[in-house]
Amino acid sequence: MNKRLVIIGGGPAGNAAATSAARKGVEVVLVERDIVGGAAHLLDCVPSKTMIATGGAMSFTNQLSGMGLEKRDAEVDVEALTTRIEGIKDKLSSDMSALLTSQGVTIIRGTAKITGQHSVEVSAPDGTTTQLEADDILVCTGTRPRIPEWVKPDGERILTTRDCYPPRVFPESITVIGSGVTGVEFVHMFASFGAKVTLVVSRQQVLPGKDPEVAAVLEDDFLSRGVRLLKGARATSIERTENGVKVICDDGRVSETTHAVIAIGSIPNTEGLGLEEIGVEMDGGYININRHCQSNIEHIYAAGDVSGKLPLSSVASMQGRKVAEQVVGGPKGPHRHLDYDKAASAIFTEPEIADVGLAEAEAFASGRKIRVTKVPFSSTAKALINNDSRGFVKIISDPATGEVLGGSIVGRHAAELISVIALAVTANLKVTDIEESLLVHPALAEALAEAAE
């Protein structure tokens, strides 16, 4: 008799686990209450990146004169953009549903509750319930935007991130509260569409925890586009005014704009799942897991954002595949445990930002000896051809062995280029492996080889 895996949540982690386990002969039942593909992925990530891409195209038209073309001002078509966002979202969701079905995965619509170490109850939208028995259970229910107690979003002027797309209107001005990854992407997005943007920065740099040189490039770009930075300030309240909103900070500074958006993190969707009742250990709503993605209860796993690890779709998918391996008894061949310190991440601002592995500031803080090499894109022919020489490539390596430990990239296509450094970090390659690779010319990737010299 085949093993049965019940998966709660159809986001990147659940989908990867379902398809991988099904291919290994496991009977898979996936329970999803919202949208196959994941609410965070299809209602947050995909729409925001779609709008960022459209905003980037608008920004590009403003650079045409530098490429020997007559400048033309583009105007956004809100209806067409909305159709584009919905079309991409629907296609991704339907394609994933079709893939799951083709692999023999049973999809049940409804809200799940774990009633025992091997049992799940599903409540359907029509009120009926289904009892499922399982050998193993995977929880991957994702997260939702965190809303502080001092603000009450109204969906009109005071917005959560999910209120921003598809867009109803584009604000004349907006205050973005939160200078992490989501916050700076929203600054870039709204500035690209012509809004006057104010960013409330609780620290002394945007992207706290990131490389200061990386943050400095982004701040310079924001300032050049007229973004107002309120550094060292924390928003404490938001008031509606006759024509917009007033954001009040703890140091007395005030930002008055037509709209405000809250982008200060997320909280896990674990309430109501019955986890506490069966003794699953959690921390702040996140499920504690070991390196196999197992909770303290052997046959209950967690993956994706609810695991409290890096909130990245790539990490969630990899965790899902690792769970599938574990369900069938563990890997059958050479195996590498998931190393979260080697996960590549990207921020889709303009310029793009990407990094992986050991950070320069982290190395210095720990006293570790490193070699840092940095090459500006302005030294590459392709950057000049693109009329965009912003940013740089930075590679961090071990001075004794030459092993690549990490790196940062700021500039056009950084999210794509970081894959080279990510592969080097994961595979324990040396800088000479990058340096001696025969790369394309002209290409931005040439800066990688130069930085590896």
Image (cartoon, rainbow, N blue to C red):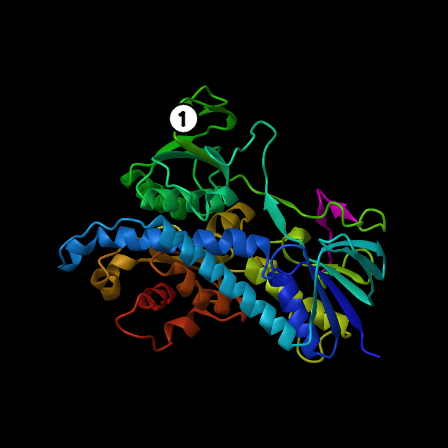
In this rendering, would 441 be left or right of 20?
Answer: left
Residue annotated with mark 1: 255
**SS for dot 1:** strand
**Residue that extends furthest to the top in the rendered view of this protein:** 252
Tell which of 431 and 240 is nearer to you: 240
Residue 343, position in %: x, y? 54, 60
Which part of the image, by quadrant, shows the C terminus? bottom left
Q: Which image quadrant: the N terminus?
A: bottom right
- Give the magenta range: 281-290
> Residue at image x 71%, y 53%?
125
As drawn, the residue found furthest toward the front would be: 126
Which is the main secondary structure of the residues drawn in magenta? loop
* Residue occupying the point 75% across, 75% down: 26
Number of dots carrying numbers? 1
Where residue 123 sits, quadrant-wise, is bottom right
Q: Position of residue 438 (x, y in %)?
A: 34, 78
Residue situated in front as seen by the camera: 291 or 56: 56
Q: Quadrant of residue 132?
A: bottom right
Query: Is 40 left or right of 231, judged from the image as shown?
Result: right
Percent across and percent down for residue 90 are 51, 61
Q: Nearer the viewer, residue 114 or 204?
A: 114
Residue 272 position, x and y percent, is 76, 46
Residue 337 shows up from this direction: no
Q: Does 140 sit above or below residue 235?
A: below
| Quadrant hosting residue 104 | bottom right
Identified by mark 1, the residue type is Ser
**In this image, 93 relative to 70: left or right?**
right
**Residue 365 part of the magenta segment:** no
Local crowd at mark 1 within 10 Å, few (<14), some, or many (≥20)? many
Residue drawn at (73%, 67%), measured in percent from left and top?
29
Q: Would residue 229 be visible to someone looking at this image? A: yes
